[in-house]
Amino acid sequence: MSGAGEQFRARRRELRLTRAAVAERAGYAVTTVVRLETDSEHTLTSTLDVLWRTLELFDAYDLPARMRAWRKRHGCSIVAAAEFAGIGETTWGETERDKRSFRPRAEVAARIEALLAGGGD
């Protein structure tokens, strides 16, 4: 196993995610995640980037705190923040409150990330 594959597997396990969960959220087959973890020398860099980004979006401790910080910094309500991100207020609220049973779809999480990364600042 290569260094990148080992790091990816370690992070996935740290987040207590299955290969299937990561693959589903990233839009890849489970076999892609398996290949990455066992032989990333043959995995395209773009695939590796998408899968790493997917792990970052799953990080339950980071995203809600960053969402709250962004909203407070901009003096926004949940409704206004959701509107800025182009998502539903329930989605924003459930994600920000870190509801364990709720995780946004990849495209919704990407909109949130885009907003937090600089959109709306």
Image: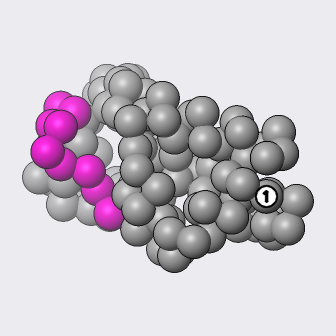
What residue lies at 22% left-to-right and 33% top-to-bottom? 98
Magenta span of residues: 97-105
Q: Quadrant of residue 83?
A: bottom left
User: Residue 5 location, x and y as percent?
Assistant: 73, 47
Q: Is residue 70 above or below residue 107?
A: above
Q: Is residue 119 above or below residue 36?
A: above
The one nearer the camera, 106 or 17, is: 17
98 relative position to 53: left or right:
left
What residue lies at 15% left-to-right and 37% top-to-bottom? 99
The one nearer the camera, 88 or 15, is: 15
73 relative position to 29: left or right:
left
Residue at mark 1: 39
Question: Is 26 in the magenta?
Answer: no
* Residue 115 visible in the snapshot: no
What residue lies at 24% left-to-right and 42% top-to-bottom? 95
Q: Please count the marks in the image.
A: 1
* Residue 4 visible in the snapshot: yes
Identify the element where label 1 is drawn.
helix
User: Residue 35 location, x and y as percent?
Assistant: 69, 64
Query: Which residue is farthest right?
Result: 41
The one nearer the camera, 53 or 84, is: 53
Q: Quadrant of residue 8?
A: top right
Q: How is the image coloured?
A: one colour
User: Residue 112 location, x and y as percent?
Assistant: 41, 51
User: Residue 108 location, x and y as percent?
Assistant: 36, 62
Classified by dominant secondary structure, the portion drawn in magenta counts as loop
99 relative position to 40: left or right:
left
The one nearer the camera, 27 or 80, is: 27
Mark 1 crowd level (few <14, some 14–19, many ≥20, 10 Å Cα): some
What residue lies at 48% left-to-right and 35% top-to-bottom? 13
Q: Quadrant of residue 15?
A: top left
- Which amino acid, by three-letter code, is at mark 1? Asp
